[in-house]
Amino acid sequence: MADGDAPDFPPGDGPTSGISVSLTAGTLQAIRERVGKRGVSAYLEKAAQWRIERDNLYELIADFDRTHGPADPEAVAAKRAELISGTSSDAGAAA
């Protein structure tokens, strides 16, 4: 458990907790224009979850690259083209 006796929660779970966050005026204005004054906390929660997911993905890719070496750029481009076109000659195979 983190923080002594407090239970661990994955991102997006557990009770809410109020904190103070500093943002530039322009960033806060852009958020409020998207979600209104009362949607800022929910927007920041989702943004933080999204960032955590991306950080975890980047860490997973870096670990894979350390173990197996970097992916072949031509193989990645071929798989990307298959995903975009919706066709695959070897469905289920990884790049």
Image (tube, rainbow, N blue to C red):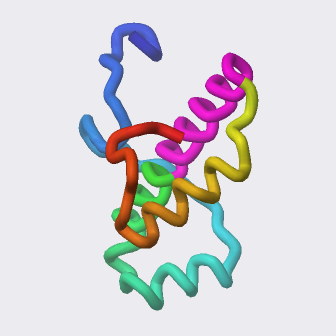
**31 or 85, which is in the foreground?**
85
Q: Position of residue 93 (x, y in %)?
A: 41, 38
Q: Position of residue 26 (x, y in %)?
A: 67, 83
Q: Quadrant of residue 88?
A: bottom left
Asked if the magenta segment contains residue 30, the reply would be no
Asked if the magenta segment contains residue 57, the reply would be yes
**1 or 73, which is in the foreground?**
73
**Considering the image in quadrants, where does the N terminus appear?**
top left
**Considering the image in quadrants, where does the C terminus appear?**
top right
Q: Residue at x 31, y 17 (%)?
A: 7
Magenta highlight range: 51-68
Q: Position of residue 33 (x, y in %)?
A: 46, 90
Which residue, as the protein is rendered here, is positioned at the far bottom?
Answer: 33
Q: How many numbered marks appear? A: 0
Chief secondary structure of the magenta portion: helix
Q: Position of residue 10 (x, y in %)?
A: 34, 31
Q: Is residue 52 left or right of residue 65?
A: left
Q: Residue at x 40, y 56 (%)?
A: 45
Q: Residue at x 40, y 67 (%)?
A: 43
Q: Is residue 17 left or right of residue 27?
A: left
